Amino acid sequence: MVDQPLPVISYARISSDTEKDEHGVEDQHRTNGATARRLGWSVVAEITDNDLSAAKAGVTRDGFEAMLRALRAGRLPDGGAVRGAVVVADDRLVRRAGDYERFVDALTYDDGRVYADARGPKNLYSEDVEAMGLFGVVISKIEVRKIQRRLRDNHRSRAERGVPVGGTRPFGWNEDKRTLNEAEAPYVRQAIRDLPRGKSLTAICAEWRAAGLRTSLGNEWTLRSLKLTLWNPRVCGWRNYRGEILRDEEGAPVVGQWETIVTPAEWEAVDAVFQARRGRSVGTGQEIGDVLPENHSQARHLLTGVLRCGRVHEGKMCGTALRVSRHKDCKSHLYVCPSKAAGGCGGLGRQGDLVEEYVIEAVLARLEERQARAASAEPWDGEERLARLVAKRSRLSEEWQNDAISDDVYFPGVKKIEAQLKELRAERHRRQAMAARAGETEDVRERWKGLHVSQRRALVFEALHAVIVHPAGKGRKPFNPDLLVPVWKEE
């Protein structure tokens, strides 16, 4: 009676373009097949996990998991017997100790299983062989971490030199990522100048779509992709590294090796707008926020979301945002409180044109007053403090590099300085944004008629939290502006 060849699984994995060029997955399976034949085994299944890392936690290799199930059961899903596995090398199989232990447990679940790589068979039932395998996994993990550290150091070095990174080209630049795309850059420049003036992301996104613009990947523009493009400090020549502006030892932003679309001051105005909106909105309980909403939608009416119902309902003020409605007996639109089913009280309404006329006049007067105060305000006095902290951080770093101070002194000290620097820079951004917005409100009364509705709404939100609309009583009453109570933003 002739012994039948032992049925085994061939496992292969490649995870980079270099590996694909040098020895593709077909070559690995071919090598595994030659090893199996030399040992008198027969490959009954080829399993591949292409483009999946064996070193990263959280990565699921479906092929690897299927092989473990087959080894533990001793058979394939179609019922075919399995008595072992063959791979090119251990590091093609696992790079994490936990995965190696799972593989050994599955393969040795029954007696008589076999395992081999290109160098020959290994007896995984031997404790010494299993220990050597685990040791190899540890060495492989150390090497992976060295590679990852070298990559991080290389990325950091490229960032500090201002070298453009790989990946898809940024919108506004050509494929070299250095020279401006003359067809795209003007749109980015105009949007960055319009946003602090009150134009909404929604309006800008609609204009870009109407102009037929597409992202670098050829997709339609969304609010998120537009926001990321305008908020990227690359537009002014700076580099964002791990969520922060990359700075040199003197605290100055590192300037990249590419052409800029706008000035740093123009980008900082946009940054201040987005920072002010971050994570803030009107809550579900209709409580009034204290900063700009996340986005001014392209509403058709000026005071949508601004007017709040002041009718006392069930012992408390309703507070619901008024909605726009129409009535056949009224030439203008109406602002009304939604029905009870829609979350309001349904018991208040006002003629839209009269309310808007009053609120516009009040807002314009407020903005003119603010502009007058900004013109006479003292300049920000934090530059000297900022420079002192930057110099202090540089001295501390120099002492640490010269071993004059220990790690226990350096790291807590530099962490405290970095926190103070971040706070001062945020304050400077806020002051710059206030000055920019005040400058934009200059001659606002003359410019009002030419502004887009989203820009008008942004100016309203600049001045107001809300306007509380109190009930006028039953029946038709003459318009009474005293029943409109603005809730102004403190400056």
Image (cartoon, helix red, strand yellow):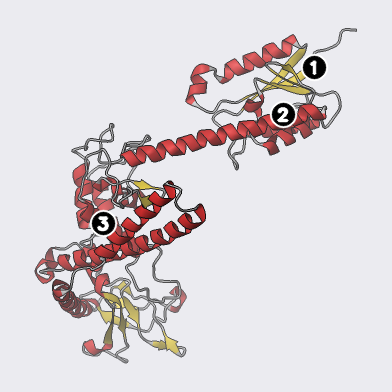
Residue 37's label in the rendered image is none
Number of disc labels: 3
Q: Is residue 476 something one can see in this rendering?
A: yes
Residue behind mark 2 = 133
Name the kind of residue labelled 3 in the image: Glu
> What amino acid type is highlighted by mark number 2?
Gly
Q: Nearer the viewer, mark 2 or mark 3?
A: 2
Q: Is residue 273 visible?
A: no
- Residue 421 in the image, given as x and y percentages of width and height: 35, 60
Q: Earlier in the sequence, mark 2 or mark 3?
A: 2
148 left or right, relative to 452? right
Would you place residue 226 above or below residue 448 in this image? above
Vertical arrangement, residue 396 with respect to residue 448, above or below: above
Say what amino acid the circle numbered 1 marks: Leu
Of discs 1 and 3, which sits in the foreground? 3
Toward which corner of the image does residue 383 lie, by quadrant? Answer: bottom left
Q: Position of residue 116 (x, y in %)?
A: 73, 20
Q: Nearer the viewer, residue 484 or 424?
A: 424
Badge 1 vs badge 2, beta-carbon distance below 8 Å: no
Q: Quadrant of residue 65?
A: top right
> Which residue position is annotated with label 1?
6
Q: Nearer the viewer, residue 216 or 118?
A: 118
Q: CA distance from mark 1 to mark 3?
A: 69 Å
Q: CA distance from mark 1 to mark 2?
A: 23 Å
> Dot 3, crowdedness within 10 Å: few (<14), some or many (≥20)?
many
Separation (CA) of disc 2 from disc 3: 55 Å
Circles 2 and 3, Cβ within 8 Å, touching? The answer is no
Label number found at residue 268: 3
Q: Quadrant of the C terminus?
A: bottom left
Furthest toward the front, the residue is 404
Q: Is residue 1 above or below residue 265?
A: above
